[in-house]
Image (spheres, grey):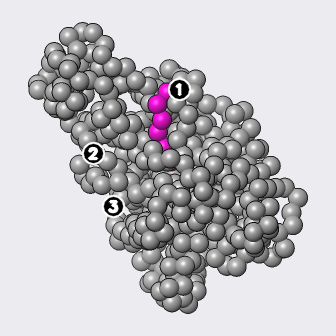
Amino acid sequence: MYVSALDLFSIGIGPSSSHTVGPMRAAHRFANEAALEGITGTPQLTVTLMGSLGATGMGHGTPDAVLAGLRGLNPETCSPLEVHGRWESLPRRGDGPGLVIELGPLDVEVFRDDLSFAPFERHSEHPNAMRFDLAVDGAVVASEIWLSTGGGFVQREGVLPLRSLTDAPAATAGIPFSSADDLLNECARLGVNFADIAWSHEAGLREPEETSAGLDAIWRAMDDCVEEGLSTRGILPGSLRVPRRAAGAQASLLARGIGRESRDPSWLNIYAMAVNEQNAAGGRVVTAPTNGAAGILPAVLKAHLESTPLTAEQTRRDVHAFLLTAAVIGSLIKARASISGAEAGCQGEVGSACAMAAAGLCAVLGGTPRQVENAAEVAVEHHLGLTCDPVGGLVQIPCIERNAVASSTAQTAARLALLGDGTHMVSLDVVIETMRQTGVDMSHKYKETSLGGLAVNVVEC
Ligand code: SF4
């Protein structure tokens, strides 16, 4: 059940893990893995974005991401500038030469109208589906459906979900668990905590120094994203023309003499907004566990590090413990409910991120496993039923502010848990199952389709 922290927190680009990062990975995999040896002739590739990808893919940069993946780019290493705006700049068929991409032995000329949107074509396995059809001289030689299952994870239609973005085999040596109850029992039996259990799995995947270096890189990228967001002003891309607010809010706090050392709670909210503004602008972002919810973990961790006098070694220890504890909670929710807004609404994205941050914070503040489980439970419980209804199909309203608010909720949940001894009425397992059932019952209008809620009540001008 454990998903490696290095996969759950992947460094990529905005604005969406399921609609940008996942489709780029899927297109890249299709381009690399389609069996085309020995095929010759005149090829034509068509890509169909189905379900939620078809409904909000335009505002989430999905066409650019698909094109980037077909061109061989990876979300981890590409420059956002190499990706954004490329699809819009392609000519339509008949209006001039298309972009030539290499698929195995074939040079395929791609035009803007080779990609189409089919929001009402729903796939039985997942609402985020895309179909790649490659024809040569009019005959189909490869046709594959890929699913973007949230958090940047992808899988082929009909294939069991992977627990790793890199197809590495799932860790087998780690302490097994399939529920929060298991985790608590193992912690009590072995005298360990959630982060120790995560380490036991990471040890089955790579050398410890590699995991440590990966966690350091994740935190560096998160922190860079906060700082970059705080130093960038302007208007976010898209029809809404939403102004960035984090940099202005920082200036206003500083002008009032409220520096970062003040521990004023506004800094927490501003950090979260800075990340989500970077994400909305398509910048470099760490999926945590999705891009739409990427601001919560960095904000809560950064606020913790700034509020506590720590040596460099203690800082590193807290960063690792926070991220690993959060990864355990994210793994549980991913396996037992969903971290995908298209599958479970925003409770699956922001609710999950809030629970992960609450658990991580509770752990680094000295919480016992029971208190950590309690913190995660409180955070999920108060996001149950939260819908996904992004205005204009953009990851901006309500997403940016929602991350700021959920960061405060994560701190509150950790504090509440630390006030008790971990005893509580509603277990994390129960609340995750409730999230799953609520997601199943939720109308598709509220699952990243922009067909309901704020998306239809806010007038775009
Ligand atoms: S409303 Fe929530 S789930 Fe939907 S795009 Fe925004 S952050 Fe993601």
Q: Is residue 371 above or below residue 425?
A: below
Location of residue 369 in the rendering, given as x and y in whole percent from the top left corner? 75, 68
Q: Is residue 285 left or right of residue 112?
A: right
Q: Is residue 227 above or below residue 35?
A: below
Q: Quadrant of residue 144?
A: top left
Residue 158's disc number: 1
Q: Which residue is mark 3?
A: 234
Secondary structure of the residue carrying tag 1 is loop
374, 378: nearer the viewer? 374
The amino acid type of the residue labelled 3 equals: Gly
Q: Which residue is mark 2?
A: 73
**Counting other residues with Cα less than 10 Å from the Cα at mark 2, is it few (<14), some (14-19), or many (20 or more)?**
many
Location of residue 300 in the rendering, given as x and y in whole percent from the top left corner? 57, 70
Q: Residue at x 23, y 49 (%)?
A: 82
Location of residue 66 in the rendering, given as x and y in whole percent from the top left corner? 33, 36
Secondary structure of the residue carrying tag 3 is loop
Q: Residue at x 11, y 25 (%)?
A: 96
Q: Residue at x 46, y 48 (%)?
A: 168
The residue mark sitting in front, 1 or 3, is 1
Range shown magenta: 151-157
How far apart marks 1 and 2 lie (CA) works out to 25 Å
Q: Residue at x 80, y 68 (%)?
A: 188
Q: Is residue 287 above or below residue 162?
A: below
Q: Is residue 11 left or right of residue 403?
A: left
**Counting other residues with Cα less than 10 Å from the Cα at mark 1, is it few (<14), some (14-19), or many (20 or more)?**
few
Q: Quadrant of residue 420?
A: bottom right
Any magenta on residue 460? no
- The quarter of the picture where the C terminus appears is top left
Q: Residue pushed farthest front?
A: 173
